Amino acid sequence: MTTTTRQATQETAAASARGLTKTYGQGDAQVHALRGIDLDLPRGRFAAIMGPSGSGKSTLMHCLAGLDQATGGTVTVAGTDLGSLDDDALTIFRREHVGFVFQSFNLLPMLTAGENIMLPLELGGRRVDDAMRERAHLLADILGVADRLGHRPAELSGGQQQRVAIARALITQPDLLFADEPTGNLDSATSAEVLDHLRRSARELGQTVVMVTHERDAAAYADYVVTMQDGRIV
Ligand SMILES: Nc1ncnc2c1ncn2[C@@H]1O[C@H](COP(=O)(O)OP(=O)(O)OP(=O)(O)O)[C@@H](O)[C@H]1O
Ligand SMILES: [Mg+2]
């Protein structure tokens, strides 16, 4: 790629990394988890990050999401260089621009599904208006949990809980949705359902989705696959 096309790609990308490195520990105990990553994640597409255990998938995701600080190189999300933000600014940035879905659904057990979905808005101090409520209903519809909103997580199946978690991650309209092994705790039929919903959120809502997985079947739902090995993209 020429420098100009590279720059153009970076500008239209939802997130970019340049020369990204991450080293854990000191001296003999040093681990080079990322050894120079150049990556552009195009807007509105569903990416899968694959690779063997220890290849740096979660580390890359954490650096792209502003959950962990890189050792070298740059990460740009929605036009902001994450390296230029201090801890407080980074926390606010994540709240406004990034959504997360984890392997363990992490719903709050004492809140209903509907309350869980609205939680990020309240944590962000946003006034919940009609437009927000409409978006919550649209997401619940798309994710097939509209009839479960009054129930607590313990009254939902694993797949339903994960779909509520996805709706919660999407309620703030994040620039990036990250999912680290989102189907790791689900059986294959339920996994297929959740993956189909992630794909639909990219196709129908224009959502940029980045999923870490080591399952080929799961990666097949993505628009493209980024393969990692020993801290590099191969
Ligand atoms: N906090 C940490 N301190 C020291 N080393 C770490 C830390 N986190 C990760 N590592 C090391 O960095 C390397 C990459 O880890 P990472 O968690 O990114 O791998 P992964 O590809 O997500 O693996 P898995 O598929 O098992 O989740 C590994 O060698 C790991 O042991
Ligand atoms: Mg991992």
Image (tube, helix red, strand yellow):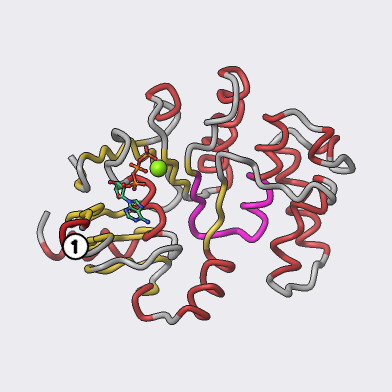
Query: What residue does disc 1 label?
Result: 19
Q: Amino acid at mark 1?
A: Gly
Q: Nearer the viewer, residue 3 or 30?
A: 30
Where, by quadrant of the figure, is residue 30 drawn?
Answer: bottom left
Residue 2: where, in percent of width, then height? Answer: 10, 59
On whether residue 34 falls in the magenta region, the answer is no
Question: In percent of the image, x 73 and y 73: which residue is there?
Answer: 126
**Residue farthest along the right direction in this orientation:** 150
- Magenta-colored span: 166-179
Nearer to us in this view, 88 or 128 = 88
Q: Is residue 226 above or below residue 2?
A: above
Q: Quadrant of residue 230?
A: top left
Q: Which residue is nearer to you in this view: 214 or 219?
A: 214
Quadrant for residue 233, please give it. top left
Task: Give the residue displayed 56% in from the left and 23% down from the top.
Answer: 192
> Is the CB of the residue bearing disc 1 within 8 angstroms of ligand 1?
no
Residue 23 percent location from the top left of the image: 24, 60
**Residue 13 location (% of width, % of height):** 35, 58
SS state under label 1: strand
Q: Is residue 26 left or right of residue 216?
A: left
